[in-house]
Image (cartoon, rainbow, N blue to C red):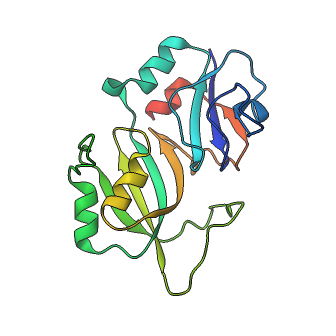
Amino acid sequence: MSLILFNKPFQVLCQFSPQDGRATLADHLKIPNIYPAGRLDADSEGLMLLTDDGKLQHTIAHPDHKEAKVYLVQVDGVPDAASLARLQAPLDLGDFVTKPCKAVRIAEPEWLWPRNPPIRSRAEHPTSWLAITLQEGKNRQVRRMTAAVGLPTLRLVRSAIGAISLATHPLMPGEWMEVSAKDLAG
């Protein structure tokens, strides 16, 4: 059984099949018979898990067994206490209500690589960084949450899945390593 930790670069699709000249997982991983256990949209970067074990893939991805995931989010604006409180409480996004989560303001991580291409920079619009920890993961959920509280997401990096993080397993975008399923639980 293989469990692969992969740092997905910006604009890479979470699939192996070709897609109209766009970069996919196949451009970075040449390991046969592995499949993503969860996804990140093309505009997001960071940690993904892939495995050749269907049972493990189901366990990692199934809502009843969701591992906590930490997202580092650069937002347009500066959150106040009310914005952070709204992010942490159940938030009605129209088609679903989020579960409570943890959201804190952080300094830009020193270890974070520059994004290519860089995000836009406007002197009259300050940006700030948040760390958001979710127990769920709906489509574009973090982006929708920050937009709902008036802080549009500029950059989104998943930095941890369960006990595995970029701090414990440093990888640059496009790099991968094999880990043990025991590492996931810590």
Residue at left 29%, top 75%? Answer: 80
Left or right: 169, with 37 as reference point:
right
Find residue 90 and report its horizontal and vertical position in percent. 21, 49
Determine whether 61 is above or below 153 in the image.
above
Quadrant in which the C terminus appears: top left
Left or right: 35, with 144 as reference point:
right
Determine whether 154 is above or below 182 in the image.
below
- Number of numbered markers: 0
Determine whether 17 is above or below 159 in the image.
above
Find residue 107 and report its horizontal and vertical position in percent. 48, 71
Determine whether 95 is above or below 131 in the image.
above
Quadrant in which the N terminus appears: top right
Looking at the image, the residue that sits furthest to the front is: 20
Give whichever of 1, 105 is nearer the camera.
Answer: 105
Residue at left 31%, top 24%? Answer: 64
Residue at left 68%, top 64%? Answer: 114
Give whichever of 104, 148 is nearer the camera.
Answer: 148
Splitting the image into 4 quarters, where does residue 33 fall?
Answer: top right
Left or right: 98, with 105 as reference point:
left
Give whichever of 1, 11 is nearer the camera.
Answer: 11
Find residue 41 and report its horizontal and vertical position in percent. 55, 42
Find residue 79 and report its horizontal and vertical position in percent. 34, 73
Give whichever of 39, 135 is nearer the camera.
Answer: 39
